[in-house]
Image (spheres, grey):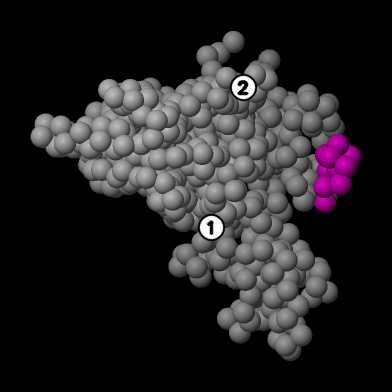
Amino acid sequence: MAKVFIYPGTSLILSDLVSRFGHRPLGSALSVREKVQTAGLDSPPLQITPEDPKKGLRFAAVEVPSGVRGRMSLHGPQIEEAEAGIIILDADLAFGCMGCARTNELVRFLLHQRDIPILELTYPRSDEEGIRFVAAIRDFLSALAGGAAA
Amino acid sequence: MSAPVRIALLACGAEYSGVMPEIYEAARQVEAEVFYPDVTLADVRAAGRGFGLDVHSADLKLMIARAEALVEGRTEADAVFIATCFRCAEAAIVRNELRRYIHEGSRLPVVSYSFTERTTAGTLLTRMEALVTIARRRALLARERQEGITLGLDSGSATTKAIIMKDNEVIGTGWRPTTQVQQSADDVIALALEESGIRRSEIEATGVTGYGRFLLGNSIGADLIQEELTVNSKGAVYLADRQHGFATVIDIGGMDNKAITVQDGIPGVFTMGGICAGASGRFLEMTAKRLGVDITELGPLAMKGMGQNVPMNSYCIVFGTQSLVNALAAGNTPEDVAAAACHSVAEQVYEQQLQEVDIREPVIMVGGTSLITGLVHAMGELLQTEVVVPRHSQFIGAVGSALLASGFIRKG
């Protein structure tokens, strides 16, 4: 089983695909769930406190906007933990989205800095492209160590 | 109990900066509720096409979609609060354009703010309070004449001012540097009473504004406790006799600055800055002290100087002071240094705040710094317009409070 960082982090389809192939998806659902299930915090809606942008300083300098650093406090540790990554470019909003373009640039950059297998695809716009898209993800996930057949 | 004022929140990055509880708390303190306007995915996809700004961040597209829902009347709100991350260029563009779009396309009062993770409810309170005042007290803000005998008190960060008005005339004034909030207020009230020849018991209604408004409002049993953004706007157009139509009010204060676009006496768009004291009256106080003149002499001194002869940047009060010291050490005249200091403060306000409001003539300068002629001159040069400084402009908050307080006089 490999830990696979998914981008966009909110994509349920990507998360599901990774799980089906026996791997562990690392995305927003996981990091936000950990935050909102932390007992003793009262900082709705995401339970992010002013301390989190400070934790994000590990990934982005102090002059970077607080929203980027707050997001990086969620995504950064997952990027460090990831053993593989799937990046979908120009995804439709319904497929999954990450709200801040600057954070997205940094996330993709940091993923590429890691010496791990990365699959980068453009979001499909037709049925044919969709079939090739899923097949490429299947092949990538199957090739990762410890994966399972779908 | 009246229904809470509903403030639509258009935000990007707030949830990830940990400031949402502060926004909710500031709203709660002024009996308002903050909500996100509902939009569909189709609205978000379409956002930008209609508005004409093709942004990359999805949360900014969402902001645009929500703003369109408000302006097109698909979502009802009483006011709008726009908040984005400090130092984000893309968000700054959207923030400015949405503020203008909402102001021009609706009657909703709108305020914007760029936050960091250090933003607190206290910082947001005056802005939220102003939104609530405009939404809830339109009838009160429509008042154009002062009636009866009223006391207005302005407890500012640097000075405390009192005004007594009778039948639409200022008949007593009091002014003191703020030390102990309560004591300073007692002193200026005594001064105003003495000048007016009025006994305290004759005062029919009292209004309080400024930083110390809650403390003083409760201690003296004020009829009106109101933030300075709406009070100063009202006071400015009243004193300048520009109660109808558009105006821009600039108040460079001791601790923060206000720039307000006013329509018929009611603020439409406003900003309140205070990140660095270099762009405030404090820097001019320091300049006067360094030049060895009284603050009242700084303006006339500056009018005799040529500011462009001296490089000065008061973006930060520390660096500004350094420029001041360097300029004097280089042999520049006090007149030129005074003029440069005035120009520098005016330029900071122009660059940092006046870009965020729509400048509508007449431009009215109020507050204690409006008596510094060099500063008014510098602002007029930057804006390429004649700046109006009405009589009693230094008492603006107190005048506005006294004017609005007369709405609370119980007719016997």
Residue A38 marker: 2
Which label sits in the foreground, 2 or 1?
A: 2
Q: Tag 2's secondary structure? A: loop
Q: Amino acid at mark 1?
A: Gln
Residue B240 at x, y percent in the picture? 55, 50
Chain to which the residue tagged by mark 2 belongs: A
Name the image quarter holding residue A70. Answer: top right
Are marks 2 and 1 in one subunit? no
The stretch drawn in magenta includes residue B181: yes
Residue B274 marker: none
Q: Residue at x 89, y 39 (%)?
A: B183
Residue B352 marker: 1
Figure quadrant of the C terminus of chain B: top right
Q: Residue at x 36, y 36 (%)?
A: A144
Give, as a single range, the part of the protein colored magenta: B177-191
The stretch drawn in magenta includes residue B163: no
Q: Main secondary structure of the magenta part?
A: helix
- Depth check, front residue: A79 or B160: A79
Residue A119 at x, y percent in the picture? 31, 43
Name the image quarter holding residue A29. Answer: top left
Q: Is residue B155 visible?
A: yes
Residue A96 at x, y percent in the picture? 33, 31
Name the image quarter holding residue B100. Answer: top left
For the residue carrying disc 1, how many other residues have a C-alpha within 10 Å: few (<14), some (14-19), or many (20+)? some
Residue found at the far top of this picture:
B1
Please give the count of numbered marks on the rendered protein: 2
